[in-house]
Amino acid sequence: MSNSSSCAVILAGGQGKRMKSELPKPMFEVLGEPMLEWVISACEKASITDLCVVKGYNADVIEEYLDGRCETVFQPQRKGTGHAVMMAADWLKKHSEGNVLILCGDAPFIDSDTISAALEQHIRQDNAVTIITAESENPYGYGRILRTENGVSGIVEEKDATEEQKRIREINSGAYWFKTDKLLYALGEIKPNNSQGEYYLTDSVYILINAGLRADAYISPNPNVVLGANDRKGLLKLNDTARMAVIEKLMDEGVEFLCTDGVSIGRNVTVGAGTKILQGTILRGNTVIGNDCTIGPNCIIENCTVGSNTILNSVQAYESQIDDGVKIGPFVHIRPNSHIKSGVKIGDFVEVKNSTVGEKTAISHLTYVGDSDVGSNVNFGCGTVTSNYDGAYKYRTVIGDGAFIGCNTNLIAPVKIGNFAYTAAGSTITKDVPDGALAIERGELHFKEGFAEKRLKGRNKK
């Protein structure tokens, strides 16, 4: 079903005082993404792209994050959910012919399937409002849904519920589909007749029912749509819930976990079958891992593409490509814009930055490769450094196929090492080296005979 005539208002004005932070509540992260981002992406996956975000506390943070992705309105005072939606009234009037989805920006687990299925029911039943609900084994604290033969008769909050009503398992998620024109009518009728002096969006359900219009509820098969966080403990539970959901999905797809301690995998990460994820591994962003890899222990891989049959052990890699059959680690840093080609071996305490490393090249240990184009089958000796920065500009180093870089070589960029060329250990290379040549660039060795004896005599007198 097309959602082109539908729009959404996302309520993101909350402060979250119990978080004890200046960050707006919807900007707290679950698996590395703000809760607000989870809600926006659920809308987009449901083909609802016409969005309005109601910002409030520390609004500039949300405005900067959105960076023009969708329209925003400002709620100067937090006077309840109904009041927040009122701030979007002018925006809603531009969409009065369709349906509008109201969502909480701090309830990250709303999903696109729930959004679409609830809209389909909303249209099919010709409802003025359709409440998105879930069934819970422990409904304490949530508003209960009161049903009749003809739909929903209202929502009763925990504090107002009778003992019989408290046994109701169907609870309000805080998300609603409305006919937009009917919502605008209800907003004009909501009154702050409560001890908090606030305008509650739940009152709109009663207003529409009393106006003779139909209200119903869609029960989501996803019980987590109701989950939010009011404090740091709640935020941890959200992260644990999301973390295990991703891990369980990957296990169903053939990914192996020997232990999940310290494992955190973003929801947009792809991992191939047969890959083994070890403890302490963090996979973020749009990372793609191939088949039959071993990742971990103690890796951070962010926005990288990793080929199949690759082993990463205690590696941090960012915004780079690592091809098939590569072995890296331990204690290696792959910085952005690097390409590690097939069959490369990188050992301990190596850093690669903005460089291409050719097939079957070996960088065994204690080496820095920065701003370099390295050919295939190159061997780096221990302690090699590409000196790429003169304090003002950065320059590239080019190393040809089959070259042998001796231990403790300094390559002063810009410089080119030819195919199958050698550099002698301890050399500082400042000029291009021809193909097949041996470059030796060392200072002259001098001896001072008897120095140690004199030095030791002076020490013994002290």
Image: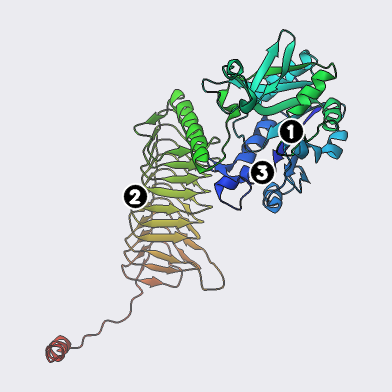
Residue plotted at (56% across, 27% down): 224
Whichever of labels 3 and 1 marks the residue nearer the N terminus, that label is 3
Residue 329 point in image, percent of width and height: 35, 49
Name the amino acid type tagged 1.
Tyr
Name the amino acid type tagged 3.
Gly
Name the amino acid type tagged 2.
Pro
Q: Quadrant of residue 297?
A: top left
Vertical relation: 197 (above or below) 399: above
* Residue found at the far top of this picture: 149
Q: CA distance from mark 3 to mark 1?
A: 14 Å
Foreground: 53 or 156? 156
Foreground: 434 or 102? 102
Foreground: 445 or 127? 127
Residue tagged by mark 3? 14
Relative to 459, 305 lies left or right: right
> Residue 330 — which label?
2
Residues at marks 3 and 1 touching, judged by CB atoms closer than 8 Å: no
Q: Nearer the viewer, mark 3 or mark 1?
A: 1
Vertical relation: 282 (above or below) 456: above
Vertical relation: 136 (above or below) 303: above
Residue 315 point in image, percent of width and height: 40, 48
Q: Nearer the viewer, mark 2 or mark 1?
A: 1
